[in-house]
Amino acid sequence: MRNGISHAIDVVEAPASKIDSVDFDNLVFGNVFTDHMMECDYVDGQWQNPTIKPYGPIQLEPSAKVFHYGQAIFEGMKAFKDDEDQVWLFRPEANIDRFNKSSVRLAIPEFPKEMFLEGLETLLNLDRDWIKKGLGNSLYIRPFVIATEPGVSASPSKSYKFMIICSPAKAYYSGEVRVVFAEKFSRAANGGVGYAKAAGNYGAQFYPTNLAKEEGYQQIIWTDANTHEYLEEAGTMNIFFRVGDKLLTAPISDRILDGVTRKSVIALAEENNIPIEVRRVTVKEIVEAAKKGELKEIFGAGTAATINPIKGFGHMGEKYELPEQAESYAKFFKSKLMDIQYNRAEDKFDWRYLV
Ligand code: COI
């Protein structure tokens, strides 16, 4: 409870914990869930009965609108444990604000911020043992909302379910990552839902990503839908390019997600006098920089992926490998971010939130 407001969250504890059956050293991202979850329903025009209960299946009508019209949005957040067993969230209010922005775009009622935070903190306190100490360990938090109203008329649902589930996590990608620049497919278009964390944005990427995987790439860097000349973001993260000593990243727009890790990297670059340009980045300039040996690094930035170096890229059938950097920006930002997230460094930007 913060600011004296309590939302009377009901708590039903799991009769026994599953934690002893989990191999924390060999976690595959997003496959194991903690003992509890949060659930809250939107009925009769309001969010009501927030409850924390044992993690488990939910029941929905086959006609529930989420199945037919994809009226669903989500977020990705992380909690970290420091050496003194304190649990920290990283910029949770930025995620909650984006959650509600996504909701508005999908005609879903916004979720009260205080109730979100209070529920999340209650959940994290119950499942605290699932958050392991040590750099690289975290708890991935997945809040989401789905449209639950039965009926297949194509109109916004009148009822919704908000949930938070949590998954102990290590790295998102288990191996090296190479990307291909999209030549034909697009992630988002002007006026569309690209800036929202709409479930369908991710589902729509699976087919082109599968084609890219057949060519040996793990991800696609999406280019603008109009011309395919500008590099925008990857499927699971925003993207940065280092040309010489300069860092480049695309500005957010209605096609590009306003990534929390992305904006943290930009702030850290500015704080550490790393030259950064937030502007449209062309495929042409990156390919030319790679040919001239001036493209030093590409890395992705996202909550799940953290800072993920890209080892190489493909474009128009050509493959480009990126050289190993002795002084890598990706490593620098990853370590700066983790120092803040794990309470190992001063939090000048006020990003940490004690649970
Ligand atoms: C995240 O980074 O939290 C995301 O939501 C990306 C997801 C597709 C794993």
Image (cartoon, rainbow, N blue to C red):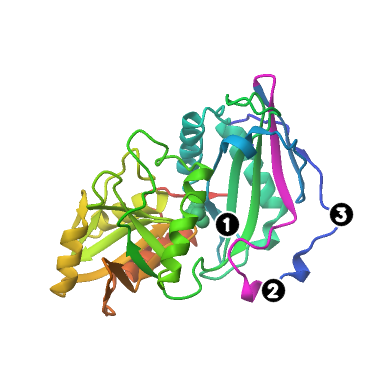
Residue placed farthest to the top in the image? 44
Q: CA distance from mark 1 to mark 2?
A: 16 Å
For residue 201, side relative to residue 13 (left or right): left
Q: Position of residue 34 (x, y in %)?
A: 70, 57
The CB of the residue at mark 3 lies under 8 Å from ligand 1: no
The CB of the residue at mark 1 lies under 8 Å from ligand 1: yes
Q: Pick the residue in front: 259 or 291.
A: 291
Question: Which comes before the other along the chain, label 1 or label 3?
Answer: 3
Query: Residue beneath label 3, please?
Result: 15
Q: Tell me the amino acid under the disc marked 3.
A: Pro
Residue found at x 46% / y 53%: 205
Question: Which comes before the other along the chain, label 2 or label 3?
Answer: 3
Residue placed farthest to the right in the image? 15
For residue 260, side relative to residue 149 (left or right): left
In magenta stretch: residue 350: no
Q: CA distance from mark 2 to mark 3?
A: 21 Å
The vertical placement of 316 against 266, above or below, is below
Q: Position of residue 173 (x, y in %)?
A: 49, 69
**Where does the magenta region start and end?**
23-45
The dot on residue 140 is: 1
Q: CA distance from mark 1 to mark 3?
A: 23 Å
Asked if the residue at tag 3 contacts the one at tag 2, i.e. Cβ–Cβ closer than 8 Å, the answer is: no
For residue 144, side relative to residue 273 (left or right): right
- Res. 147 image quadrant: top right
Residue found at x 58% / y 64%: 29
* Residue 116 seen: yes
The dot on residue 23 is: 2
In magenta stretch: residue 39: yes
